[in-house]
Structures are given as structure tokens and as C-alpha cells.
Image (cartoon, rainbow, N blue to C red):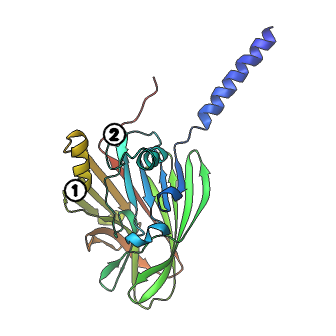
Amino acid sequence: MKKILLFAMMALVLSACQKEAVQPKVYGRYVPERKDDFAWENEFAAFRMYGPALAAENPSNGVDLWLKASPELVVDSFYYREHVLGKPYHINYGKGLDCYKVGHTCGCGGLVVLAEGKTWIGGPYDRWEIIEQTPDRFVFRLEYDSLQVGESVLQESVTITAEAGNAMNEAKVVLNGEYAGELLVGGGIYMHDTIDHFEVYDALGTVFYEEDALSDKTAAQMNYAYNGSTSQGRIYITVRTPEATVTDIQDGNLIAVKPYTMGDTLTYYFGATWSEWQEKTEK
């Protein structure tokens, strides 16, 4: 009987350990039910990039940001709430919201190409691939066939890594094609109409931007209509391009870019947090 009880206790302990071990902190997937979105998240924030089914709406290769109130994974529940229950994810029902408008911009940490005195932003991705998916790490690649820079059309490949415990995503970018002029490439942040604060750290190749979470008028109106709220806290966004030679505002984008040679791999980092985020503690 003692042996039976001992084995039963060991089985319970192993079962509990296994259950704890597989609790994911990072998650991502292709989202065909929402026009080919590709979405991912870790404890701090959720993001998405736009796919070919959205092409008619002139999206970009920029990054959209979803704010999270806690480390709980929310991507699937946000899409379900929006597309099945009809409750827009632009409204905060207690777990966060999508209030950061991207349009045809670099959004929250998307690729920026500076050439011919202006910034060039691409369109939606053409192909996607998940490279690695574990409870603590998510790696995927998006391929773009037609990044317009001047009169040239380039191909873009970006591999993004999100990890548990790290508020910054890693982006590894490779461009291919023919372009005769100088290219400066890196990450950028689109600044909305209400610009409250930004900082540039030239020595680190880092740019930092802060804004009211309801800077977008549509999100502000929807949240006010739902709960009378005129505030959803503040958003903090950072982009770091190591050894950036230009950290500046160009065409409404706060950028950190550096000279690029076609075919090379350029690495930069981007991430965001929300003033309303709170870490859960087990009771």
C-alpha cells in the first residue's frame, strides 16, 4: 500500500510539473479569418502584421500594436471577440485593446528605408513561415516581393523573434534587388497627431516615443461610447538599431537607421509597453 501511495504521489508531482512546464508565455499564428494577419505576443504586448488579403485597403509592412493589461495571452480571444462575438478589439473590456493606428506607415517598429531624402514604406507580406514555436520563444519569417524604393522594386525578408521575459522583439532584415543609390535601413515609430513626448538616444541608436493611448480619434470615440472613458493610459514604444547613423524624425516617423549593403542582414529591435499593464501574482 505504501508503494502504491508513493507512486500515486510521484505521478501527481510529475503531472503538476508537466502542466507548469507547458504554460506558454509567447504565442503567434497566421490568422486567415482576419484577412491574412500574422499576429504574435509575449507577456508585455501583442503585435500583428498585414497580409495579402488586405491589399485592397493599402496596408503597409508596418507593425500594429495591441495593448495588454497583464501577461495573459490574448491574441485568440481578441480575434474571437471581434469576429465571432462582434465586440470590437478597439474597446478595452478589461484585458487590453487595439488603439494604435498604422495605416500605410511603419507603425510600432516596422522597417523603414531612407533614400532619396524620404522614407519608403512597403505593402503587405506575400508569404509567411513559422520557424520555431515553443512556450518561451516564437520565431517567424515574412517575405515581401515588392518594396518600392525610388524607381526600384526590392524584395524584403524579415525574421522576427519574440521571447518570454523580453519586451523587445528582434527583427533580422535582408533586402535584395538593384538600387544604385545609398540606402539607410532600420526601425521606425509612426507618431500620431497628438505628439506628447519623444526622445532620441543617438549614442545607442535608440529612439523612444510616448503617447496617449487614445491618440487615434476612432479608438477614443469607441471607448468613450462604451464606458465614458476619455483615457486609457499611455503607450511607450522603443526602437533600437545598433550603430544607427541617423536618429531623427522623417515624414512623421521617428527612425533609427544606418547604411545598408544589399543582401546583408541588418538586425534591429522594437517593443512597447502600456501604463495599465500589471503583472499577475499567483495566490
Which one is in front, 26 or 231? 231
Which one is in front, 137 or 213? 213
Residue 135, image x, y percentages: 58, 44
Inspect the image, locate mark 2, and give the three-letter code of the amino acid beneath it. Answer: Tyr
Residue 216 in view: no
Tell me which residue sits at (39%, 55%) in the image.
Answer: 271
Residue 179, located in which quarter of the rendered image? Answer: bottom left
Tell me which residue sits at (38%, 87%) in the image.
Answer: 150
State the residue position of label 1: 217
Question: Considering only vertical position in the picture, is 109 above or below 222?
Answer: below
Residue 85, image x, y percentages: 42, 44
Q: CA distance from mark 2 to mark 1?
A: 18 Å
Question: Considering only vertical position in the picture, is 175 above or below 268?
Answer: below
Image marks 2 and 1: residues in contact by CB distance under 8 Å: no
Marks 2 and 1, the one that precedes in the sequence: 2
Residue 92, image x, y percentages: 32, 43
State the residue position of label 2: 93
Dividing the image into 4 quarters, which one contains the N terminus? Answer: top right
Inspect the image, locate mark 1, and give the three-letter code of the amino acid beneath it. Answer: Lys
Helix, strand or loop status at disc 1: helix
Which one is in front, 100 or 111? 100
